[in-house]
Amino acid sequence: MGRDWIFVCATSELLPGESRVAWDGDTPILVVNLDGDYYALEDRCSHEDFELSAGALDPAEGSIECVLHGARFDVRDGRALCAPAYAPVAKFPVEVRDDGVWTRDDR
Ligand code: FES
């Protein structure tokens, strides 16, 4: 899985503070624009596999909170910031080209 880049959306559709979900095969990927920098994480909480994209993005802190039990993750590197999650979420590469945002599951 994941040898090819997956088109997420046009850059104009992912403004600072916004997020989008794209799929690479069976992998849901949450792509976030933080002040013009793009980051991609697996859209799956490391606590109980819930979709992180259902939760609130905090652009100031650069974190996203899982809506199920309140774990927070740093969107820049996927590390868990508070219980009940301790394991990080997988981080994926992002590329911006031709006014589009691309990502892929590179595992
Ligand atoms: S599933 Fe995300 S905090 Fe429990």
Image: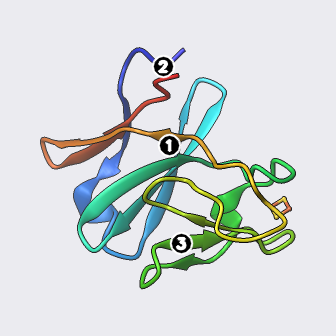
Disc ID at residue 67: none
Determine the quadrant in which ligand 1 lies.
Answer: bottom right
Mark 3 is surrounded, within 10 Å at the Cα level, by few (under 14), some (14 to 19) or many (20 or more) other residues, namely many
Q: Mark 2 or 3, which is nearer the eye?
A: 3
Q: Give whichever of discs 2 and 3 has the lower sequence position.
A: 2
Q: Is residue 101 above or below residue 56?
A: above
Q: Which residue is mark 1?
A: 91
CA gap between label 3 and label 1 equals 13 Å
CA gap between label 2 and label 1 equals 13 Å
- Amino acid type at image mark 2: Gly
Secondary structure of residue under mark 3: strand
Residue appearing at x 43%, y 79% in the figure = 59
Left or right: 12 in relation to 71: left
Q: Mark 2 or 1, which is nearer the eye?
A: 1
Q: Which residue is mark 2?
A: 2
Determine which quarter of the picture holds residue 69.
Answer: bottom right
Disc ID at residue 63: 3
Left or right: 93 in relation to 29: left
Does mark 2's beta carbon lie closer than 8 Å to ligand 1? no
Left or right: 38 in relation to 60: left
- Amino acid type at image mark 3: Ser
Q: Is residue 84 above or below residue 45?
A: below
Q: Give whichever of discs 3 and 1 has the lower sequence position.
A: 3
Quick one: which residue is furthest to the left in this view? 98
Secondary structure of residue under mark 1: strand
Quick one: which residue is furthest to the bottom in this view? 60
Residue appearing at x 31%, y 71% in the figure = 15
Between 90 and 20, the residue placed more toward the observer is 90
Q: Give whichever of discs 2 and 1 has the lower sequence position.
A: 2
- Asked whether disc 3 touches disc 1, contact meaning CB atoms under 8 Å apart, the reply is no
- Amino acid type at image mark 1: Lys
